[in-house]
Amino acid sequence: MGGVPVKHHSKSKVGRRRSQQALKKVHISVCPKCKGPTLPHRVCAQCGTYSRS
């Protein structure tokens, strides 16, 4: 099943579908204790503290 596509997809149709696959910006927070970079809602990799921001 699934070999050849039944209909042709235009460039704009394919582009609109692929526009959702772009990489999103990573938001980096600053750890309030050691001032190291951390992801939000994650434990700090350097000092091990947890802060919601």
Image (cartoon, rainbow, N blue to C red):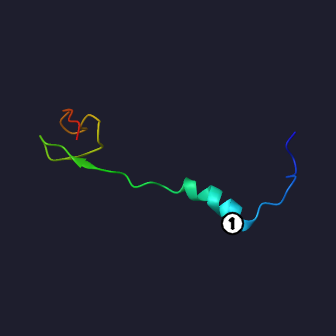
* Residue toward you, 43 or 10: 10
* Residue type, mark 1 in image: Ser
Foreground residue among 42 and 10 = 10
Q: Position of residue 30 (x, y in %)?
A: 20, 48
Q: Residue at x 20, y 35 (%)?
A: 51
Relative to 19, residue 50 above or below: above
Residue 34 quadrant: top left
Please tell me which residue is depicted at 48% across the width and 55% down the height of the picture.
23
* Residue furthest bottom in the image: 11
Classify residue 48 as left or right of residue 20: left
User: Quarter of the image containing the C terminus?
Assistant: top left
Residue beneath the point at 58% across and 59% down: 19
In the image, 42: left or right of 46?
right
Asked where in the image residue 7 lies, by quadrant, the reply is: bottom right
Residue at the left extreme of this rendering: 33
Vertical side of 24 occupied by 34: above or below: above
Determine the secondary structure under disc 1.
Answer: helix
Image location of residue 12, percent across then percent down: 68, 66
Within-10-Å neighbours for mark 1: few <14, some 14–19, many 20+: few
Residue highlighted by disc 1: 12
Q: Residue at x 23, y 36 (%)?
A: 52
